[in-house]
Amino acid sequence: DGATLAFGADSETTLQHIHNGGLILNSAMGLFFRDNGGEYIYSAGDGDLRIHSGTKIHLGANVGIGTTTVDNNLHIYGTSNPTIKLEAPSGERPIILFNTATTTKPHIQFAAGDVLKSYIEGGGNDDQCIKIFTSGSANEWKFTDSNQLSGSISSTGSFGTGHFMSHVGVGGIPTNPAGMGNNLQVMGDTGDLQISLWSKSDSLSHDTRIGELAFMAGSDTTIPNVASVMGKVSGSLENGGYLSFQTRTAGDSGGSPPERMRIEHDGKVGIGT
């Protein structure tokens, strides 16, 4: 115990035996392989162990970082926000590559207590889409390679503030999506398709606007409303309503267009009054 072996002409490399511990290589040196050809292990300081290889390092078993209970090929555990960081110099991009040659698609999974909560699926040699699954796999949102976004029939939820730059389809995918001529298209296999503008308030007063279909023309700064159809509350309760039609006189650029016609709750029609 405590014996030391010295190597080299000036004994610059030493190995010291530690009782029930092993061997200590003096801190200034490393353990080299293959004629000092570039593969070596050394310590750059207390708590700083470095492994250097010219081209690659192969590990033939599962790897754990921060844990000895290794459940996967790479298992990282940290007590405070464990992080994987990819950093590249200017002009280069960090890349995470998922490579598969089959129809079994790679996943990025999110779990809580080993219970799958959501995941992202992509790749595969039969489909170039990206899918986002939530509530385990109950809800599915799909981004296709033809610039489409679709949701499964069971998907629920909403989009927040934002916009779509092109055509939007609801309820189905046309036979020729690229030829969809409408900015908004509602599609179904049977009749009775509906678009609803719904105010869920129980305290709407008379003449309160529920919704509006507006026709606009001009620049983004002025946003002139040239014509519109409004649905408004009639009476003191929310169970009655009327339609109001507005048009703007040519050359008039101020304010909202005036009402030209109204269909009352009882079916009576007023034009100009």
Image: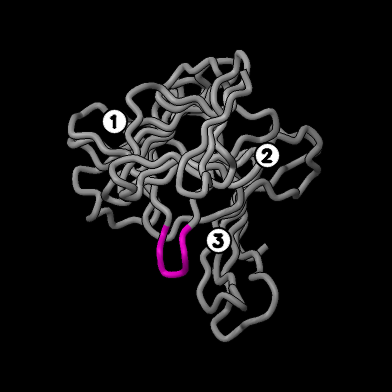
Residue drawn 55% across and 72% down? 226
How crowded is the residue under tag 1: few (<14 C-alpha within 10 Å), some, or many (20+)? some
Residue 199: assigned label: 2
Expressed as whole percent of the image width and height from the top left, the position of residue 253 reads: 63, 82
Q: Look at the image and say whether residue 150 sits in the magenta stretch.
A: no
* Three-letter residue code for mark 2: Ser
User: Distance from label 2 to label 1 (Cα)?
Assistant: 42 Å
Residues shaded magenta: 88-93
Q: Residue 33's quadrant in the figure?
A: top left
Which of the pair 273/184 is nearer the observer?
184
Using the image as rendered, state which of residue 128 and residue 49 is in the foreground.
49
SS at mark 1 in the image: loop
Q: In which quarter of the image is the C terminus?
A: bottom right
Q: Which of marks 3 and 1 is nearer the N terminus?
A: 1
Sequence-earlier tag: 3 or 2:
2
Badge number at residue 105: 1
For the residue labelled by badge 2, is the local secondary structure a helix, a strand or a loop? loop
Mark 2 surroundings: few (<14), some (14-19) or many (≥20) residues within 10 A: few
Residue at the spot x=58%, y=70% of the render?
225
Q: Does residue 149 appear in this view?
A: no
Name the secondary structure under disc 3. strand
